[in-house]
């Protein structure tokens, strides 16, 4: 990570979730003199039927490949699947077919569950780069692919289908929930009061949650102060989601 970036003297806000490792959280906390870190309210979808179908198809050989875009998506898919079917069977099924990780973090999270990514693509500039990389590795025509859609930012599904693949989405999380009493509302209050100089989003899931919360709070003063806020994105996939949701990043930080 870039340790030259420092916001000492300014208050930094950060929205994290359980997929963000402690070392990253510790590093975020070191960036500013005062850091307001809050846990995102992100839970598995209330209806498990879609995920249950995906897990069952995976176990019965219904997929030719699985693609994970984020570490957060890997975490939630695995944790939820293990509640539905036996853990070892899920891990074995992922190891039996091409399991692709987009970015280092997704690859590391798979490895933590005992799944070595068939191939791990580097963090890419756009979904087009991802698609080009997949074309070089796989014969996409007639493949049935499970695609993690934690953050619907890529035209990747459409690109795969245009090349003859069948795509089923893995909807692993639901971040469209509001709770006026949740701790993450402190971040919005701090922005509204002009207390934050910068806001850091570590992954696309947290970025999507942040954008959703901002959109749901219709306060002109919040939108005004938001324009003065320095937005930091960790990795390109987070930057792309923020841009897609109308919150262009001022600084993009890369993992080491």
Image (cartoon, helix red, strand yellow):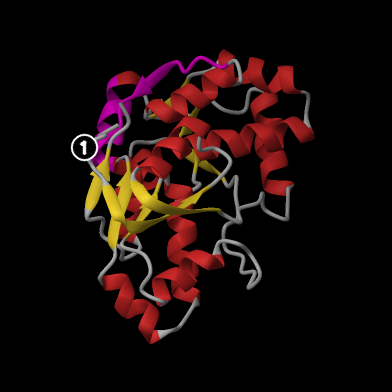
Task: Say few, some or many: other residues with alpha carbon within 10 Å of mark 1 (under 14 / 14 to 19 / 20 or more).
Answer: few
**Residue 239 spot, x, y in % from top left:** 30, 49
Is residue 216 in view from this perspective?
yes
Question: Residue 118, located in which quarter of the rendered image?
Answer: top left
* Residue at 35% across, 53% down: 241
**Location of residue 228 with respect to 156 vertically, above or below:** below
**Location of residue 158 with respect to 123 vertically, above or below:** below
Depth check: give the residue in front, 80 or 181: 181
Task: Pick the quarter of the image with the C terminus.
Answer: top left
Q: Secondary structure at mark 1?
A: loop
Specify the segment rendered in magenta: 115-136
As drawn, which residue projects farthest toward the bottom? 220
* Residue at 37% across, 83% down: 221
Depth check: give the residue in front, 92 or 166: 92
Question: Residue 159, located in which quarter of the rendered image?
Answer: top left
Q: Any magenta on residue 127? A: yes
**Residue 110 spot, x, y in % from top left:** 53, 23
Q: Which residue is mark 1?
A: 4
Judge from the rendering whether residue 118 lies leftward or rightward of residue 170; answer left or right. Answer: left
Task: Pick the quarter of the image with the N terminus.
Answer: top left
């Amino acid at each position: 990570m870039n340790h030259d970036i420092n916001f000492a003297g300014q208050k930094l806000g950060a929205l994290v979730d359980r997929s963000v490792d402690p070392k990253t959280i510790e590093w975020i906390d070191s960036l500013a003199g005062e850091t307001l870190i809050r846990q995102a309210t992100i839970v598995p979808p209330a209806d498990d039927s879609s995920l249950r179908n995906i897990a069952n198809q995976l176990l019965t050989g219904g997929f030719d490949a699985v693609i994970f875009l984020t570490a957060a998506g890997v975490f939630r898919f695995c944790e939820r699947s293990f509640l539905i079917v036996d853990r070892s069977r899920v891990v074995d099924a992922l190891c039996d077919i091409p399991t692709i990780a987009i970015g280092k973090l997704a690859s590391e999270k798979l490895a933590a569950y005992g799944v070595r990514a068939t191939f791990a693509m580097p963090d890419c500039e756009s979904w087009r780069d991802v698609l080009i990389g997949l074309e070089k590795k796989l014969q996409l025509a007639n493949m049935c692919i499970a695609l993690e859609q934690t953050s619907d930012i890529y035209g990747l599904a459409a690109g795969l289908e245009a090349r003859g693949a069948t795509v089923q989405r893995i909807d692993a999380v639901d971040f469209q929930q509001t709770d006026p009493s949740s701790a993450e509302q402190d971040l919005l209050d701090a922005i509204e009061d002009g207390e934050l100089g910068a806001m850091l989003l570590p992954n696309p899931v947290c970025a999507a949650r942040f954008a959703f919360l901002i959109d749901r709070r219709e306060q002109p003063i919040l939108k005004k102060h938001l324009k003065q806020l320095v937005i930091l994105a960790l990795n390109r996939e987070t930057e792309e989601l923020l841009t897609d949701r109308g919150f262009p990043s001022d600084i993009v930080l890369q993992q080491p």
